[in-house]
Image (spheres, coloured by chain):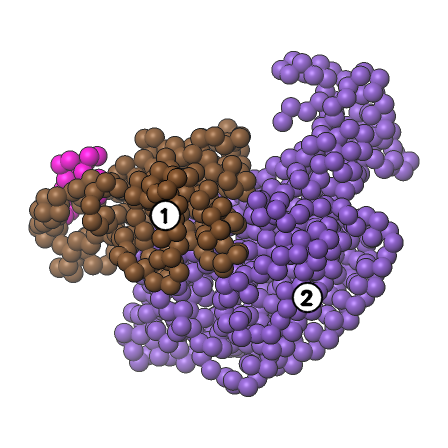
Chain colours: A brown, B purple
Amino acid sequence: MTTGPDDKGPLDAVAAPAETPPAPIRTDASPVERDAVVHADVERAQQGQAPPGPDQGGREPIEVIDVRTGMFGAADGGDTSGYGGLVRRIAMPGASERPYGGWFDEAVDVLTEVLDEDGPGFAAAVERVVVDRGELTLHVAARHLLAVCRTLRDDPDLRFELSMGVSGVHYPHETGRELHAVIHLVSVTHSRRLRLEIAVPDAHPHLPSTTSVYPTHDWHERETWDFFGIVFDGHPALARIEMPDDWPGHPQRKDYPLGGIPVEYKGATVPPVDQRKAYS
Amino acid sequence: MSPSHAGPAGAPGATRATGSGGATRATRGFEDRASGTTTFEASGGDWSQIAEEAARLGEERIVVNMGPQHPSTHGVLRLMLEIDGETVTEARAGIGYLHTGIEKNMEYRTWTQGVTFCTRMDYLAPLFQETAFCLGVEKLLGITDDVPERATVIRVLMMELNRISSHLVCLATGGNELGATTIMTLGFTAREEVLKLLEMVTGLRMNHAYIRPGGVVQDIPPGTLESVREALGQVRSYLRQLEDLMLANPIFKARLVGVGHLNLSACMALGVTGPVLRSTGLPYDVRKASPYCGYETYDFDVPTSTDADSYSRVILRIEECYQSMRIIEQALDRLQTMGPGPVMVADKKVAWPAQLAIGSDGMGNSLDHIREIMGTSMEALIHHFKLVTEGFRVPVGQVAQSVEAPRGELLVHLVSDGGTRPYRAHFRDPSFNNLQAVSMMCEGGQVADVVVAVASLDPVLGGVDR
């Protein structure tokens, strides 16, 4: 991937300002590309880089997961087209405004009511509501995950009684929210589906285990720990499940190399797949 | 694991005295320095001698490793059983022996190439992974409604054929594990009829990579409809024979009835879906609950039972085969009435440029297409090259897509970062999830019942470990 740590482009500074404060300028960068660095800095200053948090009023800032330059998506080699200065900020779909449409409003209303009455409160527990491609995603604060899950399962108007398990996604450029756990829930009663997304920092990748609410999460949380290194506090036996017990590292993270060896065929050498020319 | 006894030969094989060369090869008990327990190693031979020695030494806790190389564990499933005589007091499943990193590999290939990887997960139901993945990609692209009707009907046809072949393997291997070789040969013979059809349409018997984002690879070849109708008759007759062999067979019933019980609340808590969930009486089927590929327009039933045991799951699987045939017949009729048409989206920025045709040297890109890109249109050549080497870009976002696989609900979670390759592709394989139920289904039962219970879950380790 172009998002790996080894091929940091000059503009990764935008996504991760804490890591690389002075934007390194590639030796082969064209003047246009260097301009782009400056533009990106200006852009960042204008955006104010407000820290994301539930207590901030209004819309959440969108999650920038990557910043790319140029027109053709190739990470290696100079972009000689003259469009090398293009800067694209790659962001996941941001928070949605009401009305969400369909049954989403009703479900969020019920959840709000129950959490506000005898829970941590909706504003504290749910960071944002995202409706994208006809699917509802609730971004949940890690410390309130159990309360949200219990409400979603037990309230008769919600009744998400069947879980499709937990998996992870690694967004290395989203500073402070690198590791996401994703839970897919199904309500057989109401024939509805939604997704919970919980972000934790790479420096402290801890989540409460939801096995007490959804026992099926036992193996799924083990798999997420195995592949992403997310620690589920309170899991009965958080051991590796797919990789051997003594395996170092967590293979599905973006900074974990795919591995592979070059293959020689009739005098030509084909590099391993993660070193081939790639487009983003 | 900290075994006091390790029996690599597995329990059922070991309980049977082998013929002339049946001398036990059990070692003398020796003290395990790490755990302080006495450990025996048995490889084949007469189990009773080992049990006797254990009894003489006053050892009560016996842990048997069943698998990962045991024929009744459907591949490389490892079962760790703590037994007391013939009773299983604790059962744990160990997986990971077939982990091949498919999900990680998919992040390094284009969206179209992803199909070639995910088809290899659950190798008995490859078309379900392909369809689920492609439906997810289409949802991300926002072209779900642009997929030609003909492609969707072909997908349904192929999936339901695949469901029959997968259920037939389940019944066949399940019978084989009980020692009923005839059930196995009959089931595999019936499956052969379906595999011939799959080969006729896709070119391959397994790992088809036939369904592509935007449609399918190529239209069904001429004569497919007739061949499918013909084969369905054959499969139906084989299924009747299987029923005759199994359903009223007193030995078969004695082994299966009341074994591997798992009730509704346990299924919901453990996220178990598919025939196992439906054997508790809940008619949950993704094809009905959240239809895809136009399943809401097909006329079929979701068979259920309330017995919640292995025997009822056998009946349900047979019944599901008949329901699949109903769907297939409707799909055939639709294909016949709609006549030839496109099987790939019209958007040339997504549709794979290959137009296959049979040439003198076998199947390959059609000469018309080659002539166009090589002889007349430079732009078409560039387009072909870029689409094949780079792939197409998929807008940023994430989707989840469920399909009803033979073993339960298969959910695909796809994340795109706007690039030409999946940022993350996760497959929630039903076998992976369902194996968690092994402990509940086996504990308290007999060792021989473990085989039956696991067979009724029908795990496919390729899908479990991915």
Residue A22 lies in the magenta stretch = yes
Question: Where is residue B78 drawn, in percent x and y?
Answer: 65, 38
Task: Examine the rendering and report whether any part of residue A231 can be seen.
Answer: yes
Q: Quarter-wise, where is residue B376 in the image?
A: bottom left
The residue to which callout 1 is attached is A113
Q: Amino acid at mark 2?
A: Cys
Question: Where is residue B212 drawn, in percent x and y?
Answer: 45, 66
Q: Secondary structure at mark 1?
A: helix
Question: Where is residue B441 drawn, in percent x and y?
Answer: 69, 42
Say few, some or many: other residues with alpha carbon within 10 Å of mark 1 (under 14 / 14 to 19 / 20 or more): some
- Give the vertical position of B211 relative to B299 (above or below): above
Q: Main secondary structure of the magenta part?
A: loop
Instruction: Measure the C-alpha gap from mark 1 to mark 2.
Output: 46 Å
Q: Amino acid at mark 1?
A: Glu
The residue to which callout 2 is attached is B321
Judge by depth and name the residue closer to the eye, B281 or B401.
Answer: B281
Q: Quadrant of the C terminus of chain A?
A: bottom left
Write down the region rendered in magenta: A15-29
Q: Secondary structure at mark 2?
A: helix
Residue at 30% over, 60% down: A99
Say few, some or many: other residues with alpha carbon within 10 Å of mark 2 (under 14 / 14 to 19 / 20 or more): many
**Label 2 lies in what chain?**
B
Task: Examine the rendering and report whether any part of residue A256 can be seen.
Answer: no
Question: Where is residue A257 drawn, in percent x and y?
Answer: 38, 40
Q: Is residue A92 left or right of residue B404?
A: left
Q: Which mark is residue B449?
A: none
Residue B177 lies in the magenta stretch = no
Residue at 81% over, 48% down: B255
Judge by depth and name the residue closer to the eye, A106 or A210.
Answer: A106
Q: Is residue A64 left or right of residue B146?
A: left
